[in-house]
Amino acid sequence: MFKKDQQQERDLFESERNFRLLVEGVADYALYMLDPTGVVTSWNIGGQRIKGYSPTEIIGQHFSRFYTEVDRANGKPVRALRIACEQGRYEEDGWRVRKDGTFFWASVVIDPIYEDGELIGFAKITRDITERREAQLKLEQMHQQLAESQKLDALGQLTGGVAHDFNNLLMIISGSVHTLKKAVGDDPKSQRALSAIEGATKRGASLTSQLLTFARRQSVNPQAVDVAERIDAVREVLDAAVGSAVTLQFDVAKGVWPIMVDVAEFETALVNLVVNARDAMTGGVIRISAHNDTPGGDGAGDFVAISVEDTGTGIAPDILNKIFDPFFTTKPIGKGTGLGLSQVHGFAHQAGGTVKVASELGKGTRITILLPRKEAAPAAEHVNAVETGGSGTVLLVEDNPEVATVSTGLLEQLGYTVRRVANAEAALREVELDGIDLVFSDIVMPGKMDGLGLARHLKAVRPGLPILLTSGYSDAALNVRGDFPILRKPYEIHELSRAIAKLPR
Ligand SMILES: Nc1ncnc2c1ncn2[C@@H]1O[C@H](COP(=O)(O)OP(=O)(O)OP(=O)(O)O)[C@@H](O)[C@H]1O
Ligand SMILES: [Mg+2]
């Protein structure tokens, strides 16, 4: 009998000891007890690891020292104990303070402990979930960025499709105007009317071009570009754009790396930024700068940063995330189309870069285009841009009959004989018949083979045959990437002539 009691007592002692060892040894949780007033009465290794206090330092101290000063001033620790008593449990995620004063994001649970109906203290469990919280925040941020880029992608697809059709129309209008101009002779009224149509077509072409850049569907001719040289080349255009009230200041660092971009797109982007800066101010200085930049500094990439900085109105924070949207403008009707920054955005991304905005209301705005560095030195390109009288037979591959008619007209005016087919398969048959001196093909065509496929095939079977591709836009055009020259639609007669003259023969 007596022996049994002893055994039981030993067992109980043993189990209590094990339990204490367990609690003390848990390293990932701070597990400890408070007395009914909130004074710490026990402490485990997890508490020491998470909060930094050894048991001797903390036992006997009030637990409110784990709270931030603000929480303490607001009576949060006392409130937590009261809620634990009233509701049987208190749970919270919030900032807590370590011994060294640093903060951590804690998950806290407080349970009241009763013995014979009387409160004898609290069990407190604290976990450090700072990392989890940071991961969560990062995830949310990524979701937001993804949503933003998906929105822009969707808009891009929509605008790209519309602009593509529009370009074919413009091609027909501008080509026909050219023909009519010759036909009407020098009747001033008709000539004036035709000039008006011509002007409107150009404006239309520049709008669709901005849209296509935004949609990243613009067919581009990337080439190595010396930034300093290019900025210098557009100086006059920019000067003319800003007028006399505003001064342009150029600050191009020495030894700026070359970049790989489409020259026309690059210049358009600069003009768009400078015009925006001008519109935001009544007078003052616009600073255009360029320098090398290695963001992150971890060799993740060498970039050239090109900034346009003004001292104008600045951009309100609530519209900051809209300014790149196509057709977003705060300008009065007729003053802005809301496509300038869309072009800048599309251009930068197509070139493998990005755009950054820093703006403060009432102070000014700095927009920076970051473009990846091009490794090799810019190739000197000396092209003879004379409009030569053409001769020989051109095989025109174009599926749209109206565009084909216009293109035929232009080619014939340049002196070429034209043979016309509507798809790649027919083109191959025609080439086999011989007598073709040059192939001029649209890229986007129905059928198994598109213009690029045709060009690649011809290059293999007829290496000496010059090929010029044309496109209003195309994702395929992006794949061309310098393999074949591309003429952008809508093109004018002198552009067509020049593009043919440039062809390697
Ligand atoms: N430098 C700037 N300072 C203040 N606001 C700016 C600046 N640049 C752009 N914005 C704001 O962003 C909007 C969109 O600019 P974006 O260039 O895309 O279109 P826009 O200038 O209104 O029209 P568009 O360029 O097509 O003629 C502007 O209407 C303006 O509210
Ligand atoms: Mg603008």
Image (cartoon, helix red, strand yellow):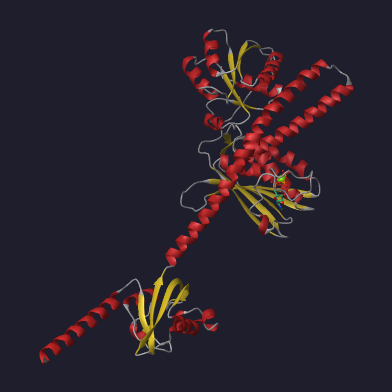
The N terminus, quarter of image: bottom left
Residue 300 can be seen in this image: yes
Whole-percent x, y for residue 327 in the image: 70, 45
Residue 56 versus residue 391: which sits nearer the camera?
56
**Quadrant location of residue 35?**
bottom left
Residue 34 can be seen in this image: no
Q: In this view, does 263 lie above or below 90?
A: above
Q: In this view, does 461 lie above or below 29?
A: above
Residue 264 versus residue 173: which sits nearer the camera?
173
Whole-percent x, y for residue 170 in the image: 71, 28
**Quadrant location of residue 27?**
bottom left
Q: In this view, does 470 lie above or below 45?
A: above
Residue 16 versus residue 479: which sits nearer the camera?
16
Number of numbered callouts drawn: 0
Farthest-out residue, bottom? 2
Left or right position of 128 against 433? left
Q: Is residue 92 above or below residue 169?
A: below
Whole-percent x, y for residue 429 in the image: 52, 11
Task: Tell me what residue is drawn at x 73 percent, y 22 percent.
Answer: 175
Whole-percent x, y for residue 76 in the image: 51, 81
Task: Tell me what residue is drawn at x 59 percent, y 26 percent.
Answer: 486
Left or right position of 250 against 187? left
